[in-house]
Amino acid sequence: MAIAKPIAVCPQCREVIHPQARVCKHCQSEVRRGTSRRERIARRLNTFRVGFIAGLATALVLTLFLYLQFGR
Ligand SMILES: [Zn+2]
């Protein structure tokens, strides 16, 4: 059995490219390597942070609203 060569697939056009290529030779799009998992986690964390801040802001506005309505 032949040893499988490490191959990479362009995320844009799905063509097989050199595993260390930075630019796809088929569609000339930039290929990012090694950051996929870390980037995904960072993006998820960022989404969580944005959601957290939005929730906090909503709670703050709601508290202020309730205070102005019934606080006096
Ligand atoms: Zn491509």
Image (tube, rainbow, N blue to C red):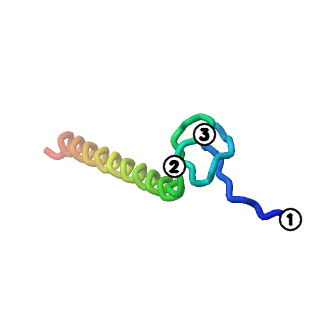
Disc 2 vs disc 1: which is toward the camera?
1
Query: Where does label 1 land, which residue?
Result: 1
**71 left or right, relative to 38:** left
**26 left or right, relative to 55:** right
Screen quadrant of the C terminus = top left
Of 19 and 9, nearer the camera is: 19
Q: Secondary structure at mark 3?
A: loop
* Residue 67, horizontal then vertical, whole percent: 20, 45
For label 1, being within 8 Å of ligand 1 is answered no
Q: Residues within 10 Å of mark 2 (few under 14, many from 20)?
A: few
Of 17 and 61, nearer the camera is: 17
Residues under labels 2 and 3: Cα distance?
14 Å
Residue at image point 28% right, 46% down: 57
Q: Secondary structure at mark 2?
A: loop
Query: Where does label 3 land, which residue?
Result: 25
Residues under labels 2 and 1: Cα distance?
31 Å
Query: Amino acid under label 1?
Result: Met
Disc 2 vs disc 3: which is toward the camera?
3
Of 58 and 69, nearer the camera is: 58
Cβ atoms at labels 2 and 1 below 8 Å apart: no
* Residue 61, horizontal then vertical, whole percent: 25, 43
Residue ranking furthest to the top: 27
Residue ranking furthest to the right: 1
For label 3, being within 8 Å of ligand 1 is answered yes
Residue at image point 67% right, 41% down: 14
* Residue 56, horizontal then vertical, whole percent: 31, 50
Residues under labels 3 and 1: Cα distance?
29 Å
